[in-house]
Image (cartoon, grey):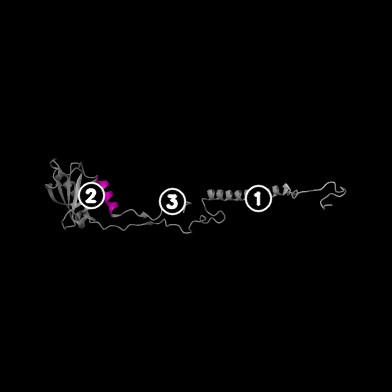
């Protein structure tokens, strides 16, 4: 009698073959494991969402200490303005202006020279422009001067005529410049506006070293 023959069968029934039924694990344990894993995942997502909300309502700062944004450098760019050095410009009384008329309108150079004299400039030659510029200046005017006048007399005179073109020539005197009046000339810049432009030229506005965007969350 086989060991697998149920007792009392007297050998009438035998279990034959080489395949036997397998025992399955209870399904209740799988469900329990799955429930535990799902619960842990849900808690993790809830915690991450809470951190995101804290970042939104606190501007990205550490919710507990009010410190810097996580992952951002602890130092921030300086927001102090860098003052530009004051430019030493010549006073109008030290600048000699030659007023030249490059248009077909008569008396233009004389009237302009008289107005510049009222504003404190020294007046040199008053007359018609040379052939190089006569009837060839389409804009309001050209300020001509030597290379030494580029950072001094030329920009000072240019404050009196908006839109004037600055051009250098071969002269050596840094305090003598020409004002060539062109077809687009109507009048000098109003005295108050010209004085304001001259003040801004002598005392440039400070340049901020940082910007407001540096305080944002992004690093």
The answer to whether residue 154 is visible is yes
Which is in the foreground here, disc 3 or disc 1?
1
Q: Earlier in the sequence, mark 1 or mark 2?
A: 1
What number is the disc on residue 37?
Answer: 1
Q: Nearer the viewer, residue 76 or 107?
A: 76
Q: CA distance from mark 1 to mark 2?
A: 78 Å
Crowding around mark 2 (Cα neighbors within 10 Å: few <14, some 14 to 19, many 20+) is many
Task: Say which residue appears at 60% left-offset and 49% top-offset.
Answer: 45
Quadrant assignment, res 62: bottom right
Q: Residue 118: where, in percent of width, then height?
A: 19, 48
Residue assigned mark 3: 213
Q: Nearer the viewer, residue 82 or 93?
A: 82
Task: Say which residue appears at 28% left-offset and 53% top-offset.
Answer: 201
Which is in the foreground here, disc 3 or disc 2?
3
Crowding around mark 3 (Cα neighbors within 10 Å: few <14, some 14 to 19, many 20+) is few
Crowding around mark 1 (Cα neighbors within 10 Å: few <14, some 14 to 19, many 20+) is few
Q: Residue 169: where, in percent of width, then height?
A: 17, 54
Q: Are marks 3 and 2 in contact (CB under 8 Å)?
A: no
Q: Residue 200: where, in percent of width, then height?
A: 29, 52
Q: Earlier in the sequence, mark 3 or mark 2?
A: 2
Q: Is residue 84 above or below residue 130?
A: below
* Magenta stretch, main secondary structure class: helix
Helix, strand, or loop for circle 2? helix
Task: Say which residue appears at 26% left-offset and 51% top-offset.
Answer: 198
Q: Nearer the viewer, residue 62 or 191?
A: 62
Residues in magenta, as a range: 190-201
Quadrant assignment, res 147: bottom left
Residue assigned mark 2: 158
Q: Are marks 1 and 2 in contact (CB under 8 Å)?
A: no
Q: CA distance from mark 3 to mark 2?
A: 36 Å
């Amino acid at each position: 009698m086989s060991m697998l023959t149920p007792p009392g069968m007297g050998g009438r029934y035998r279990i034959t073959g080489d395949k036997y039924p397998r025992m399955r694990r209870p399904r209740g344990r799988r469900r329990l494991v799955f429930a535990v894993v799902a619960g842990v995942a849900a808690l993790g997502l809830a915690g991450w969402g809470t951190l995101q909300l804290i970042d939104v309502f606190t501007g990205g700062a550490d919710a507990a200490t009010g410190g810097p944004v996580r992952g951002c450098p602890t130092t921030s760019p300086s927001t102090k303005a860098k003052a530009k050095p004051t430019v030493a410009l010549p006073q109008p009384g030290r600048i000699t202006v030659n007023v030249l008329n490059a248009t077909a309108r008569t008396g233009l150079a004389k009237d302009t020279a008289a107005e510049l004299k009222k504003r404190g400039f020294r007046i040199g030659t008053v007359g018609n422009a040379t052939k190089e510029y006569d009837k060839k200046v389409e804009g309001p005017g050209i300020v001509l001067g030597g290379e030494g006048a580029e950072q001094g007399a030329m920009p000072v005179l240019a404050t009196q005529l908006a839109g004037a073109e600055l051009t250098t020539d071969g002269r050596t005197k840094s305090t003598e410049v020409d004002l060539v009046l062109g077809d687009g000339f109507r009048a000098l810049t109003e005295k108050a506006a010209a004085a304001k432009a001259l003040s801004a030229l002598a005392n440039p506005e400070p340049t901020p070293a940082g910007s407001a965007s540096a305080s944002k969350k992004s690093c």
